[in-house]
Image: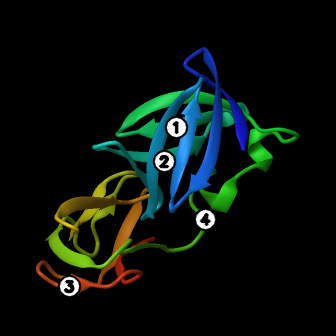
C-alpha cells in the first residue's frame, strides 16, 4: 500500500508491505523494518532497537493527530481513492468504542506492577499495569479517560495472551 503523508508540513511517500511477520515501511526511499503489536488501545512499534508507543486521535474538522511516546504530531494521510476518515483499519484511529475498555495482555508474561486500583480516575494514555514479556517491560495504558472498575491481576501473577487485566469505564 502506498500512502501520501504530510507530517508537520513535510510531505512524503510511504510504502508499507507485510514481509515474514513484520512490516516494511519505505519512507522516501529509505527502508525500515517495523514489528507492530496492538497493546491496550495503542500500538507498540519496534523499529531497529527503539520502541515507540503510538496512538491516534481524530481532531475537530477531520484532522488526525498521531501521538508518539506522548508527543502529539499533526498528520495528513491520503490513501488511493479514500479519505482518511473512511480508512480506519481495525478501528485503530478514531478513538475508543463506547462501553467498558478492557486492557488485555498482548502476549504471555508476568505482571511486574499494578499502577491503579478500582475506583481510580484515569486519563487517556495513563499507565495501568506493567507486564514483563521476553525480558522487556511493557506499560499498558488506558485509551480513554474514565474510572477503573476492575483490576483482575496482582503483581507477580503470570498471564496468557488475551487475559483481561484491567477494565476502565
Please report contact status of discs 2 and 1: CB closer than 8 Å, yes or no: yes
Quarter of the image that includes the N terminus: top right
| Percent coordinates x, y for residue 93 in the rendering | 61, 50
Precedes in sequence: disc 3 or disc 2 = 2
The local crowd at label 2, few if under 14, some if 14 to 19, many if 20 or more residues have their Cα within 10 Å, is: many
The structure residue drawn at horizontal position 60% and vertical position 29%, both measured from the top left corner, is 75
Residue 66, numbered circle: 1
Q: CA distance from mark 1 to mark 4?
A: 18 Å
User: Could you say which disc has been placed on residue 55 in the image?
Assistant: 2
The residue that disc 4 covers is 97
Disc 3/disc 2 C-alpha distance (Å): 27 Å
Q: Nearer the viewer, residue 47 or 147?
A: 47
Q: Secondary structure at mark 4?
A: loop
Position in image of residue 118 (x %, y %): 27, 76
Identify the mark nearer the N-term, 1 or 4. Answer: 1
First of labels 2, 1 by sequence position:
2
Q: Looking at this view, name the residue that lies furthest to the right.
A: 81
**Disc 3 versus disc 1: nearer the observer:** 3
Amino acid at each position: 500500500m502506498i500512502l501520501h503523508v504530510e507530517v508537520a508540513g513535510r510531505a512524503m511517500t510511504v510504502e508499507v508491505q507485510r514481509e515474514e511477520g513484520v512490516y516494511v515501511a519505505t519512507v522516501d526511499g529509505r527502508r525500515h523494518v517495523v514489528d507492530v503489536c496492538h497493546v491496550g488501545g495503542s500500538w507498540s512499534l519496534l523499529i531497529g532497537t527503539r520502541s515507540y508507543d503510538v496512538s491516534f486521535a481524530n481532531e475537530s474538522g477531520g484532522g488526525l493527530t498521531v501521538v508518539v511516546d506522548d508527543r502529539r504530531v499533526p498528520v495528513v494521510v491520503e490513501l488511493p481513492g479514500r479519505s482518511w476518515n473512511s480508512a480506519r483499519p481495525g478501528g485503530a484511529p478514531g478513538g475508543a468504542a463506547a462501553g467498558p475498555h478492557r486492557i488485555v495482555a498482548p502476549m504471555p508474561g508476568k505482571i511486574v506492577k499494578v499502577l491503579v486500583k478500582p475506583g481510580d480516575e484515569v486519563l487517556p494514555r495513563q499507565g495501568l499495569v506493567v507486564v514483563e514479556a521476553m525480558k522487556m517491560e511493557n506499560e499498558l495504558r488506558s485509551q480513554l479517560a474514565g474510572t477503573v472498575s476492575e483490576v483482575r491481576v496482582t503483581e507477580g501473577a503470570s498471564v496468557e495472551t488475551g487475559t483481561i487485566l484491567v477494565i476502565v469505564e
